Image (cartoon, grey):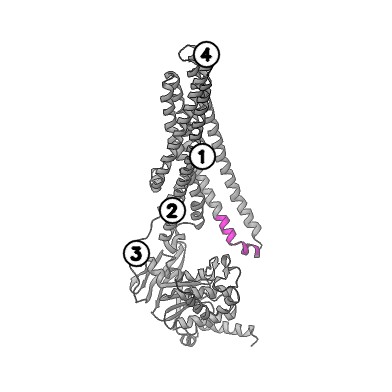
């Protein structure tokens, strides 16, 4: 029940655990003094009338010891809090730093829901493990030995019998430990599965409502919840059974100690004071170990949680990449292939070139692999075949910080964080308000914000209080502030109003004059100004060239372009 790696990971908590144990031990000594004083007073009472001074002395000793116990309880609580605080800060920092090191492709190796659960519920379990279980574990080792030494001065036989009975509690704990460990491992597995299902359904709630599939997903969720309920009930049953066994041992052992004390008194081996002293302390032999037993399920949960946390922390990192992108930002993709699973390849030996300072478009029907190329270039998907180089350096050898600094990705659903407009923009660059207003003017969003609360306009979660077009304009403003060498626009103008689309395309065309711009678009009218256009179909490049050149070919691109123009003219009534 003691995980050396876990304790070593949060080594700063050791001093607080030691302080907690020390305060509990001082409290125990105070209790021994109280019991000894009461036993001595009763002994005098049995043979002679007590003096007023005896009563005053007893009351004074009890009050003093109670005061000491009160202070010790406060110190113990403080140490427990500080230990828990240290654990939460340390482990959550380690988890967060690990995810940062895994980088943009972290979800290829671990589910987001699992990260959330281990960093919240898992760490909470370990907070209790360090704040309650570990101090109680060490105190439960010291307390019986202390009482044994004290009671030996009164009656050795009683002390030995009480001490021998105490280890029966940890024996009972060890008996169920193997079974409990497997059970709790299943519990955490089902818990993360339930969390994953819940998170997915929550994120897709609007879609479920639109297609009236919420009942189906609700039934699916109920099945997962029922599995979790069953495993939870098994855990609770295990805990209840182990507690019952420990209670029988604890109270039975205390009863044996009391009976033995009375027997020794009847045999004349101890006086009434000694008999009463042993009776009063018999329960104290078992209470620390009994409390440790009550923390058993916390410890087991903590062990299961720590296994999950260390599984996350032990994920292999591809940290050998040390190269940095230089001024040369030419991108070359040679024989590029990629599969999300082994049974279906998405890209088939794709060759692409994106020259520095060029405007390149990638077009094609949905599912042809356009966005997969963008994910590879931004480092989100790493398990690709072939080669991708930036400035002659393999993307696998480029440090992710350098990659993120040099490439800005703007998707069709760019994430806007809950907070003010200023806070969202300052993520890209720490600049003055004048610069923020400049880029807002560029994307035609300044007038709207001036009519609201300016840069302090508050944005709700997922930008639910502004339109889709305004959200994309804000995302573009943030991208412009990032001032990177390469910009990738992945359907950045889809599902927004025509005015916002025109404003965004105007800025993309201007940006292409000084930066390397890659535009992925389903709307071919947006790519006519591109220096080069790659036409993709079923994971292959089937055409490439400028807009006029591709129209002359009278092939796939020309057919798609003419079809879209005719459709748009029809909707406009032309």
Please tell me which residue lies in front, 483 or 454. 454
Q: Which residues are magenta?
A: 196-209
> Farthest top residue?
267
* Up/down of 271 relative to 396, above or below: above
* Up/down of 215 relative to 251, above or below: below
Q: Of marks 4 and 1, which one's residue comes earlier in the chain? A: 4
Q: Of marks 3 and 4, which one's residue comes earlier in the chain? A: 4
* Foreground disc of the pair 3, 4: 4
- Identify the residue position indicated by label 1 in the image: 297
* Up/down of 155 relative to 541, above or below: above
Q: CA distance from mark 3 to mark 2?
A: 21 Å
Q: Position of residue 258 (x, y in %)?
A: 51, 20
Q: CA distance from mark 2 to mark 1?
A: 23 Å
The main secondary structure of the magenta stretch is: helix
Please tell me which residue lies in front, 48 or 500. 48
Q: Of marks 2 and 1, which one's residue comes earlier in the chain? A: 1
Does the residue at mark 4 contact the one at mark 1 (Cβ under 8 Å)? no
Please tell me which residue lies in front, 466 or 56. 56
Q: Position of residue 70 (x, y in %)?
A: 51, 37
- Identify the residue position indicated by label 4 in the image: 47
- Identify the residue position indicated by label 3 in the image: 321
Q: Of marks 1 and 3, which one's residue comes earlier in the chain? A: 1
- The residue that appears at 50% across and 12% down in the rendered structure is 266
- Identify the residue position indicated by label 2 in the image: 312
Q: Secondary structure at mark 2?
A: helix
* Foreground disc of the pair 2, 1: 1
């Amino acid at each position: 029940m003691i995980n050396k790696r876990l304790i070593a990971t949060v080594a700063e908590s050791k001093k607080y655990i030691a302080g907690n144990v020390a305060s509990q031990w001082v409290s125990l000594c105070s209790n021994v003094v109280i019991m000894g004083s009461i036993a001595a007073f009763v002994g005098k009472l049995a043979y002679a009338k007590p003096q007023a001074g005896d009563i005053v002395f007893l009351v004074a000793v009890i009050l003093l010891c109670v005061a000491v116990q009160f202070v010790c309880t406060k110190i113990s609580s403080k140490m427990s809090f500080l230990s828990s605080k240290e654990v939460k800060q340390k482990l959550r920092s380690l988890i967060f730093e690990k995810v940062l090191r895994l980088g943009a492709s972290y979800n290829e190796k671990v589910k987001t829901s699992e990260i959330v659960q281990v960093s919240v519920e898992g760490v909470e379990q370990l907070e209790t493990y360090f704040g309650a279980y570990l101090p109680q574990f060490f105190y439960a080792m010291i307390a019986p030995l202390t009482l044994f030494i004290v009671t030996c001065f009164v009656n050795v036989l009683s002390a030995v019998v009480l001490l021998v009975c105490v280890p029966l509690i940890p024996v009972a704990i060890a008996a169920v430990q193997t079974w409990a460990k497997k059970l709790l491992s299943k519990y955490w597995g089902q818990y993360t599965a339930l969390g994953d299902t819940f998170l997915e359904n929550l994120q897709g709630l609007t879609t479920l409502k639109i297609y009236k599939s919420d009942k189906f997903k609700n039934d699916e969720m109920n099945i997962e919840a029922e599995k979790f309920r069953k495993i939870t009930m098994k855990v609770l049953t295990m805990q209840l059974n182990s507690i019952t066994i420990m209670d029988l041992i604890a109270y039975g052992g205390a009863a044996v100690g009391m009976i033995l004390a009375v027997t020794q008194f009847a045999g004349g081996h101890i006086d009434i004071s000694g008999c009463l002293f042993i009776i009063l302390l018999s329960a104290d032999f078992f209470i620390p170990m009994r409390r440790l037993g009550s923390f058993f399920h916390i410890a087991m949960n903590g062990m299961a949680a720590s296994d999950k946390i260390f599984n996350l922390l032990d994920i292999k990192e591809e940290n050998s990449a040390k190269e940095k992108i230089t001024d040369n930002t030419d991108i070359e993709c040679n024989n590029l292939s990629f599969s999300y699973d082994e049974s279906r390849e998405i890209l088939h030996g794709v060759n692409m070139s994106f020259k520095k300072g060029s405007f390149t478009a990638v077009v094609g029907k949905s599912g042809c692999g356009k966005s997969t190329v963008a994910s590879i270039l931004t480092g989100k998907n790493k398990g690709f075949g072939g080669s991708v180089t930036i400035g002659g350096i393999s993307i696998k050898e480029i440090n992710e910080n350098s990659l993120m600094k040099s490439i800005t990705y703007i998707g069709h659903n760019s994430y806007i964080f809950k907070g003010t407009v200023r806070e969202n923009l300052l993520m890209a660059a720490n600049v003055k308000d004048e610069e923020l207003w400049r880029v807002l003017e560029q994307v035609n969003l300044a007038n709207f914000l001036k009519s609201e609360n300016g840069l302090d306009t508050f944005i709700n979660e997922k930008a639910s209080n502004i339109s889709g077009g305004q959200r994309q304009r804000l995302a573009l403003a943030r991208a412009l502030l990032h001032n990177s060498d390469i910009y990738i626009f992945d359907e950045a103008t889809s599902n927004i109003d025509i005015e916002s689309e025109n404003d965004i395309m105007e800025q993309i065309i201007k940006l292409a004059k000084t930066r390397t711009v890659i535009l992925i678009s389903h709307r071919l009218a947006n790519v006519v100004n591109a220096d080069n256009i790659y036409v993709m179909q079923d994971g292959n490049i089937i055409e490439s060239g400028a807009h006029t050149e591709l129209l002359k070919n009278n092939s796939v691109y020309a057919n798609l372009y003419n079809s879209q123009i005719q459709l748009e003219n029809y909707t406009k009534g032309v």
